[in-house]
Image: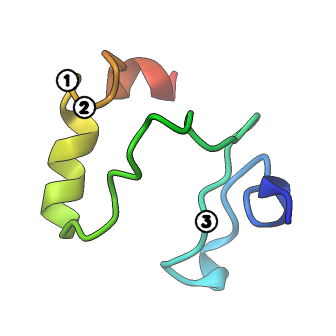
């Protein structure tokens, strides 16, 4: 399957439920050397990992959203 089967250009409506793939223009998987950081993490641990620039290759959450 292609990524776009699940990941559209925008988020799905709330009526689809809480646990649906996020939408984003040009969504793609990270490079192979990038660990899938969400595997086996609690929601709190995932939040901290996303905000850790050392784990995100220097990407900043605020910058990536805008």
Residue for badge 1: 54
Instruction: From the top left corner, tell me how far across and down residue 25 is, in percent.
Output: 74, 36
Please say if the residues under marks 1 and 3 sit with CB atoms less than 8 Å apart: no
Between 64 and 38, the one nearer to me in the picture: 38
Q: How far is disc 2 from disc 3 in space, using C-alphas?
A: 22 Å
Tag 1 and tag 2, C-beta contact below 8 Å: yes
Does dot 3 land on a helix, a strand or a loop? loop
55 displayed left or right of 24: left
Q: Residue at x 85, y 58 (%)?
A: 2
Picture residue at 33% right of the left edge, 20% below the top? 60
The local secondary structure at tag 2 comes to loop
Dot 1 crowding, Cα within 10 Å, few <14, some 14–19, many 20+: few
Q: Position of residue 21 (x, y in %)?
A: 61, 65
Colour scheme employed for the rendering of this structure? rainbow
Whole-angstrom CA distance, mark 1 to mark 3, is: 25 Å
Q: Nearer the viewer, residue 45 or 33?
A: 33
Pointer 2: what residue?
55
**Disc ID at residue 17:** none
Mark 1 or 3: the one toward you: 1
Q: Residue at x 25, y 31 (%)?
A: 55
Q: Position of residue 36 (x, y in %)?
A: 41, 52
Give the numbered dot on residue 21.
3
Front: mark 2 or 3 = 2
Is residue 38 or residue 34 the one in the foreground?
A: 34
Query: Which is nearer the N-term, disc 1 or disc 3?
Result: 3
Q: Is residue 22 left or right of residue 7?
A: left
Residue 1, above or below 52: below
Which residue is situated farthest in the front direction here? 33
In this rendering, position of residue 2 left or right of residue 15:
right
The quarter of the displayed image where residue 58 is located? top left
Q: CA distance from mark 1 to mark 2?
A: 4 Å
């Amino acid at each position: 399957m292609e990524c776009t089967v699940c990941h559209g250009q925008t988020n799905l409506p709330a009526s689809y439920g809480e646990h649906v793939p996020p939408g984003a223009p040009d969504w793609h998987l990270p490079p192979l050397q990038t660990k899938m950081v969400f595997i086996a993490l609690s929601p709190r641990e995932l939040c901290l990992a996303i905000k850790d620039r050392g784990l995100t290759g220097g990407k900043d959450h605020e910058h990536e959203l805008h």
